[in-house]
Image: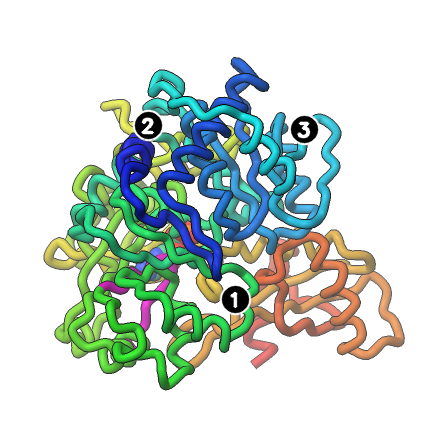
Amino acid sequence: MKVLDSIDKFAKTDRIAVKCLDKELTYKELKNYSDKIAKYLLEEFKEDRTPIIIYGNKKNEILPVMMGALKSGRAYVPLDITFPEQRVNQIINEIKPKVIFNFTDSCLKIEEALEINYNDLKDILNKTISVRISNDNWVKEDENCYILFTSGSTGKPKGVQISKRNIDSFTEWFERYLEFDECPGNILNQISYSFDVSVIPIYIGMANGKTLFSLNKDTLEDLHILFNELTNSNIDCWVSTPALAEICSNFDDFNKSNIKKLSTFVFAGEVLTKKLVRELMNRFPKTRMINGYGPTEATVLISAIDINDDMLSDERSIPIGYPISNCELNIVDEHGNKVKEGQKGELVVIGDSVSKGYFNNPEITNKVFFTTSQNQQGYKTGDLAYYQNGIIYYCGRKDFQIKLNGFRIEIEDIENNLRKVQNINNVVVFPIFNEEHKISHLTAYIVLNEENELSNLKNAMLIKNELKKLIPSYMIPRNIKILKEFPLNTNGKIDRKKLMEDLK
Ligand code: AMP
């Protein structure tokens, strides 16, 4: 696997692999620690290759644990600290790990799993003698490298399994697209490890000896620290969702004279607006700007394009680009037949980038994944799009999946969890759009089982407090409004259209 070979190669230099605030880890340390962790896993857990859990945010030592897992032939499951305890436990119950590397201050206390905290990890690193782990132990072709849990419409997260073959397919294409070489450089490592855009700095950045410039959750929550970090960063490649760049654009000083080396922006994960691109083009002249598109199920990105001035003056939205070279991207109608150029349909991807499916969930896997007669793996993205001159344009979703501030959310995931809150009879969650047709926030409409004397505000507060225990904070609707009843359609279901009209 290229990233593992590269770590060994750059370990012979003095390069820094990862930086977070004032802490650094060199490639030498990364190699040394990952070898020790792999040795520990191989010796302690022998043939049992159950995926390991990594719970934490951007601690530098998370990377050697990930790489150590891969060297020992195990997949890792990164769980971010924004996941509430219930969701963490749900995922742990699903994976049934033998070992959890816990980088947080709280203890998970899972009976069947060995929990290794930061101090235990240091002990392991001190006690274990470093030996090079033979490639025979590394993860191979269709074996999983990582499993990422995304919001699921049933209210239970789905674990997307990504294999070595999937990662190779993505990195071979996108590394070439980025024109990366092995010169020293700094790449932004901002996205939480439980979201797949973080794969770009790890599997392309580290495979080319770059330094990962990490921004942790605390830094991201304090705009002044964030800005200070960025201006001192020397990053030349920016990787984020458009949401972070939008936040940074609130600072007048977010420009080329303060982030001098920045030569490429890679945006991925949600709609990139012309307004943001125009703003950035003014502040960062002559800087490459790439719009990347892809679902976690097909490994990070499956199309990309460099944005130019013509696209900004075009009446169409910014395209999501040219397809990845090693997969087939088709636009199909409701019968699965390819549509003509310019016609809208569902985007379906076939090829080596496509995951084998959701962990332990054949039912949902079979709904969206398929195998072709040539034995290739396919995935129905649920995204609507059309082709024009070989370029793909995105036109929204077929279902209730949304992106809010870069986070992927199934509206039904929120609704199903709201139904678990006491005294809630039924609920409808609507995304609220701003003038640029982007979702600004969510509003939940709720009918209670038993009316109470409390104000809407008080009810909303109580409901939000309960909901926080079930879903990550970025999924909590900003507004909660209590209604007496919902309009029903002839099938007896809530009439969402009518409700929306009534609320206007
Ligand atoms: P995730 O699995 O979190 O990467 O989310 C994948 C979904 O995000 C896709 O199916 C799209 O709906 C949306 N998405 C990702 N990239 C873009 C983009 N560049 N433009 C518009 N939507 C995007």
Ligand 1 image position (quadrant): bottom left
Q: From the viewer's perspective, tell me whether residue 63 is left or right of residue 41.
A: left
Label 1 lies in ligand 1 vicinity (Cβ under 8 Å) = no
Quarter holding residue 48: top right
Q: Position of residue 271 (x, y in %)?
A: 35, 65
Q: Position of residue 305 (x, y in %)?
A: 19, 59
Amino acid on which disc 3 is placed = Ala
Q: At 52% across and 42% down in the image, what residue appears?
A: 78
Q: Position of residue 184 (x, y in %)?
A: 24, 52
Label 2 lies in ligand 1 vicinity (Cβ under 8 Å) = no
**Mark pair 1, 3: CA separation:** 31 Å
Q: At 31% across and 41% down in the image, what residue appears?
A: 335
Region of the chain picked out in magenta, as a range:
264-275
Q: Are marks 1 and 3 in contact (CB under 8 Å)?
A: no
Residue nearest the viewer, comparing 502 with 1: 1
Q: Nearer the viewer, mark 3 or mark 2?
A: 3
Assign the N terminus to one quadrant of the image: top left
Q: From the viewer's perspective, tell me whether residue 373 is left or right of residue 228.
A: left
Q: What residue does disc 3 label? A: 113
Mark 3 or mark 2: whose residue is earlier in sequence: 3
Quarter holding residue 34: top left
Q: Secondary structure at mark 1?
A: helix
Q: Which mark is residue 371?
A: 2
Q: What residue does disc 1 label? A: 219
Q: Relative to 110, does residue 342 appear above or below in the rendering?
A: below
Q: Secondary structure at mark 2?
A: strand
